[in-house]
Image: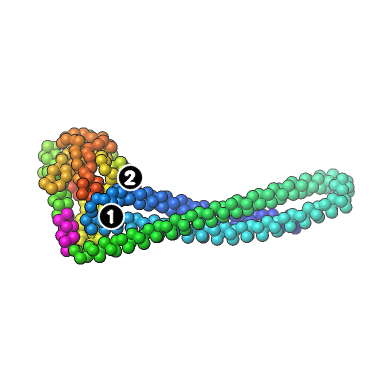
């Protein structure tokens, strides 16, 4: 009976420890899956950067443009290295946990086998010294004989379960060994991949440093270029907001409301569209089928010339040549803006929200036209000197710009 109790305690302890280790490994596995998803996205981003910004090296780029593009790739590469390092470190932790678990499971299995063999030996000795029939017939009464019979039956069942648990524990140990081998293989691949990424990172940094040295010689000229570019952007933003304010005044006047209101007086149909776009915040499709955000929303220092400040009312998306811009939600074309020295911008109203699509080479819609989600509204302009195709995309709540990244799915 003591052996049975000891054996049962060891089985319970062993299974409890296995469950704890299993839960820990499950949590680690979830984090690893998230990291793996991040790693694949970053690798895809680098592929897109190479395709969209570096595929045609024969194009003559300014030093500033070269440094901007290279800076974008270096930042993504740095994040990739960091994520891959974390993956490798977590795999090291998992490997250590698995190795300790394997050692413990192996030791416990040996103890279980030893206890089980002792129990079998004692059972055999008892069986050879006195037969089961004699054990039963020597009972003082029928009740005692019945209890002895039940005991023998339970003992045989217990022995069978003990044998099954030993087999199960052996299988657990084998699974841990297989998992350990797989983890070591994954870690080796990640380390190898990270070494290659770090080498490319060093090469890109060296190229960037050379370009930055060249850029510093003419920094004043580049600051002037950035300011002129910002001036044009500011003019377009100012015009967009002016047109939105005028549209608000016109809609309110038509509805008999206040002329100075900051929001649209909406028809029931427009209100439904406005409510629907709000309900789909974070789920809207991209304004291009394929692209990469190369400039974020808001006030920020220039990525290369830190003394220059950029104010962006939207995001800039690099996209393949001949890419088509598309509406992100149903709405009505509010206006088409044409500026001297700049490419057209299309404004689409979605109730109390407006989306703006700037730097179009061709426009396929007209003012007042109703559009559906993903409907093509124009072709994105390609700069013939740099070979870059970029769409500037903005979202406004009435006349106030908001961050497009909070509206577009996985932007």
- Of 401 and 299, the residue lying toward us: 299
Relative to 306, 160 lies left or right: right
| Residue 349 visible from this viewpoint | no
What residue appears at the point 71 percent right and 50 percent down from the top-left corner?
A: 162
Q: Kindly identify which numbered label has been placed on residue 409.
A: 2
Q: Nearer the viewer, mark 1 or mark 2?
A: 1
Measured as percent of width and height from the top left, residue 391 is found at 24, 46
* N-term mark: 1 or 2: 1
Query: Dot 2 lies on which element?
Result: loop
Total label count? 2
- Residues packed near mark 1 inside 10 Å, few (<14), some (14 to 19) or many (20 plus): many
Residue on which disc 1 sits: 69
Does the rendering let one see residue 159? yes
Q: In screen coordinates, is 295 left or right of 101?
A: left
Residue 265 is labelled as none
Residue 247's place in the image compared with 199, above or below, is above
Badge 1 element = helix
Locate residue 15 relative to residue 24 in the image: left or right.
right
Whether residue 308 is in magenta: the answer is no
Q: Position of residue 118 (x, y in %)?
A: 77, 56
> Is 240 drawn above or below residue 28 in the view shown?
above
Kindly report the distance in space between the C-alpha atoms of the residues bearing marks 1 and 2.
24 Å
Viewer-side residue, 146 vs 200: 200
Image point (87%, 48%), residue name: 131
Q: Which residues are magenta?
A: 220-230
């Amino acid at each position: 009976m003591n052996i049975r109790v000891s054996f049962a305690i060891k089985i319970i302890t062993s299974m409890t420890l296995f469950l704890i280790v299993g839960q820990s490994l499950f949590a680690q596995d979830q984090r690893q899956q998230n990291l793996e998803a991040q790693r694949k996205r970053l690798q895809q981003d680098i592929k897109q950067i190479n395709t969209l910004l570096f595929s045609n090296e024969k194009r003559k780029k300014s030093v500033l443009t070269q440094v901007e593009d290279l800076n974008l790739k270096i930042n993504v590469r740095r994040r990739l290295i960091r994520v891959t390092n974390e993956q490798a470190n977590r795999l090291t932790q998992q490997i250590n946990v698995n190795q300790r678990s394997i050692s413990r499971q192996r030791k416990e299995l040996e103890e279980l086998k030893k206890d089980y063999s002792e129990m079998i030996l004692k059972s055999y000795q008892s069986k050879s010294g006195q037969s089961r029939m004699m054990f039963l017939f020597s009972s003082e009464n029928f009740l005692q004989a019945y209890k002895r019979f039940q005991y023998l039956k339970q003992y045989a069942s217990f022995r069978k379960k003990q044998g099954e648990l030993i087999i199960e524990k052996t299988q657990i140990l084998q699974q841990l060994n297989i998992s350990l081998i797989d983890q070591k293989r994954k870690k080796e691949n990640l380390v190898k991949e990270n070494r290659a990424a770090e080498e490319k990172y060093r090469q890109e940094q060296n190229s960037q440093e050379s370009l930055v040295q060249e850029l510093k010689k003419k920094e004043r000229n580049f600051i002037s270029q950035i300011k002129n570019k910002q001036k044009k952007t500011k003019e377009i933003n100012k015009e967009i907001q002016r047109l939105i304010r005028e549209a608000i005044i016109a809609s309110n006047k038509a509805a008999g409301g206040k002329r100075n209101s900051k929001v649209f007086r909406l028809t029931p149909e427009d209100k439904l569209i406005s409510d629907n776009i709000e309900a789909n915040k974070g789920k809207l499709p991209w304004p291009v089928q394929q692209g990469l955000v190369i400039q974020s929303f808001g006030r920020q220092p220039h990525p290369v010339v830190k003394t220059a400040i950029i104010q962006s009312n939207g995001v800039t998306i690099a996209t393949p040549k001949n890419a088509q811009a598309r509406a992100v939600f149903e709405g009505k074309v509010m206006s088409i803006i044409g500026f001297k020295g700049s490419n057209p911008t299309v404004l689409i109203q979605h109730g109390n929200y407006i989306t703006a699509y700037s730097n179009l080479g061709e426009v396929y819609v007209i003012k007042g036209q109703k559009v559906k989600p993903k409907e093509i509204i124009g072709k994105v302009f390609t700069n013939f000197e740099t070979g870059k195709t970029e769409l500037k995309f903005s979202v406004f709540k009435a006349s106030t710009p908001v961050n497009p990244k909070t509206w577009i799915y996985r932007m």
